[in-house]
Image (cartoon, rainbow, N blue to C red):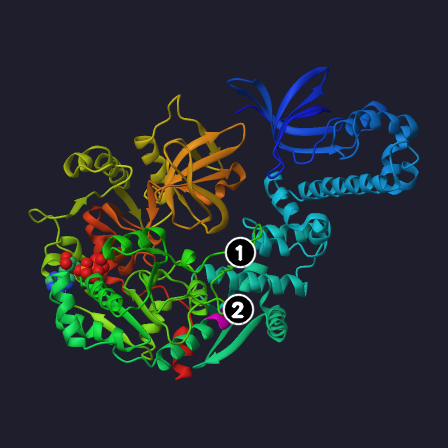
Amino acid sequence: MEEQLVVEGIVEDIIYQNEENGYTVCTIEYEGEEVSCVGMMLGVHPGEEVRIVGEWTTHPIYGRQLKVDTFDKSIPKTVQGIERYLASGAIKGIGPKTARKIVKHFGLDTFRIIESEPTVLSQIQGISEKKAKEISEVFRAQHELRTAMMVLQEFGITPTYAIKIYKRYKDQTVEVIKTNPYRLAEDIFGIGFKKADEIAMQIGIARNDPQRIKTGVLYLLNNASLEGHTYLPRDLLIGRARELLTVPEEAIMLIENALDELSIQRTIIVKNYDNRICVFLKYLFDRELQIARKLIDLAALYEKDMPFDFERELKQTEKELEIKLVEEQREAVRHVLLNGVTILTGGPGTGKTTTIKAILHMLEKAGEDVLLAAPTGRAAKRMSEATNMQAQTIHRLLEIGYLKEDDQRQMFNRNAENPLEADVIVIDEMSMVDVNLMYALMQAVQEGQRVILIGDADQLPSVGAGNVLKDMIRSERLPVVRLTQIFRQAQESAIVMNAHRINQGDEPVYNEKNTDFFFMARSVQQQVQDTIIELITTRIPKFQKVDPLKEIQVLVPMRKGLLGVNELNKVLQKALNPPALTKVEKEYRDTIFRIGDKVMQIKNNYNTPWKILAPTGYPLDEGIGVFNGDCGMVKAIDLQREVLTVLFDDHKTAEYEFNQLDELELAYAVTIHKSQGSEYPVVILPIHSGPPMLLSRNLLYTGVTRAKKMVVVVGLKDTVSRMIANNSELERYTNLMTHLRQLI
Ligand SMILES: Nc1ncnc2c1ncn2[C@@H]1O[C@H](COP(=O)(O)OP(=O)(O)OP(=O)(O)O)[C@@H](O)[C@H]1O
């Protein structure tokens, strides 16, 4: 990389500008030469003086270019510059001819006249008073943009974020930044409390400013929700707030006051349950409460009788499906048919799918309309395959609507006013459903509809806030049917048997003849890495005839270290998709995205448009929304348009602007957390060392149960044993169970 340099010049020509993200290719006049500049330069116009900080790069076709890191600009100061600026089309309604007339008339005073005396401007022939006003408004808007970008850059905000911020607040930008920069942390994805706090400190907001303390507390509660909690115990929250806000012990009152104020404003709810003072964000408190209420109503107000002679219908169904249900499965079927809500739970191979198939068969015969859904696309696909019926994601079921930029609130077209139309709603993989999704689902169902919730409560809980499935089961207030028998076919699978062993606290059995569960002892981390690469590139594909990219998945307990997701992705990328002349690359932060890379979407983006294209390129289907956990492959990278295209596993194609690449990650290795709800033919699990708290039984259990054909554990047996022994899940502070118990 060459050294950073500063270039000052006058913009000559705009060759390309993407109005959405500000990506610009332009030429400037610099020391008598014409220089091409490329980068984020929202709102530059010919004639403006720019000061660019950047570096020289060489483009294979266009030659030497100045890559812009930051820039600032001032409006032109010479008569020629002013005329060039106006003539460039920067202001709608002024073309080269009018520009000449205006500048001839007002000279260096032109901009002042346009901005503050539009009536004078209308003296020019051909400019009506109305038009003069319009011109003035456009000019002022541009002035605002310019000022906003300058102010943002002054506070060390990179152009990419500056554009996001400007697009969010428009003409309010400077005011927001200067009065309450903490709003950035709430409103802009990628800006946290710490960055906002830095800006606040620069502006001179005091450390003990009540607004600062309140925002800090809300930020912590928000962050806690990202860790899965729906509340924090008051003492824990105060401790975290002191640390974040560097409030000394004796000033703890400041935090207590902030809690009181937020509570009076009803932004937070403070409750005392069993001598624990719990602090909730109000919306999360309400959502858990509403879920509890609806579940209880669905269960209590269901009045339909068994639609047919149960024994006769069941016999008939068994005949038609060629199965014989065991007693606990028959009980499960009977229970579902008699109740408004049923939670059906059990480990792998305990016959959940078989039972649900029998239920669906009987319900269909009774003429009931059924809707099937699961939290992820992959889980929905598996459900479709298993039942031969259409299943969709819960988001799609609830008809997710269009959201404004950066607005993270979920808005569903199916809701209390427009509920789902069906007699029965079946949701699979309930362990992954968080409070927000469950709330949305519960809004869209009504009393009288039958709800069947299926899941394995021993899987890791949802990534988002809440512990919905476990809380529902533990409350002992809702009808739960547990399947426990492991069937013969399933017993032949060492994956299934070992999963159950792990779940009960026993050691897995490794490497028996014809097994599908292997252990490879490697004591040094580097050896683990090398072994994984050898397994994935040669040994497993040869042995199992699987596609290394699509059918083998490395699942990792942690993000950091030699065996963390980040590092493993780098080495696996090198092994599976090395650089080549034909493969375009884009470096973003410390990741290189290359054509052919396996990637994963890591946040829900309800607005990203997608298309499903026929091989001819003709669009077969289109929609919006790509979701956390969706996997695919980089299909194209367009360096000129600054766009990367991903083809997802479910055949959707979506485009990412380069400044949106923080939503994507390489996915040769993914965390076990992110793999929930997915299944892969072959799973490789590096289990070596790490913080004991993270290495837990249900993490190992979830990892193992993702595999269909083969599991290979590489690393230390001791660590595997320690994980199995560590049954103390990280505590999740959630309240659905308490609500359920208090309501009945
Ligand atoms: N009543 C039964 N009699 C004989 N075999 C059964 C019965 N019920 C289920 N099985 C068999 O047991 C195996 C596991 O069943 P199923 O796929 O329904 O379980 P599951 O709980 O859905 O498993 P997973 O969670 O792993 O998908 C299957 O091969 C299935 O055919």
Q: Nearer the viewer, residue 246 or 612?
A: 612
Query: Residue at point 14% right, 68% down?
Result: 316
Residue 285 magenta-drawn? yes
Which portion, as a residue range, is magenta?
A: 283-287
Question: Image check: 447 left or right of 544?
Answer: right
Mark pair 2, 1: CA separation: 14 Å
Residue 519 badge: none
Question: Image check: 621 left or right of 222?
Answer: left
* Disc on the earlier residue, 2 or 1: 2
Report helix, strand or loop for mark 2. Answer: helix
Residue furthest to the bottom: 744
Q: Would you place residue 392 above or below residue 337 in this image?
A: above
The residue pinned by badge 2 equals: 283
Report helix, strand or loop for mark 1. Answer: loop
Residue 507 in sight from this viewpoint: no
| Residue 544 lies in quadrant | top left
Question: Would you say the residues marked 2 and 1 are in contact, meaning their CB atoms lie under 8 Å apart?
Answer: no
Q: Nearer the viewer, residue 176 or 612?
A: 612
Residue 201 magenta-drawn? no
Residue 418 in sight from this viewpoint: yes
Task: Tell me residue 112's x, y (percent).
Answer: 87, 37
Callout 2 environment at 10 Å: few (<14), some (14 to 19), or many (20+)?
some
Main secondary-structure element of the magenta-colored stretch: helix
Task: Tell me residue 418's x, y (percent).
Answer: 48, 66
Residue 408 badge: 1
**Placement of the C terminus among the 4 image quadrants:** bottom left
Query: Residue at point 66% right, 63% down?
Result: 211
**What amino acid is found at the position of numbered circle 1 in the picture?**
Gln
Q: Would you place residue 271 above or below residue 617 in this image?
A: below
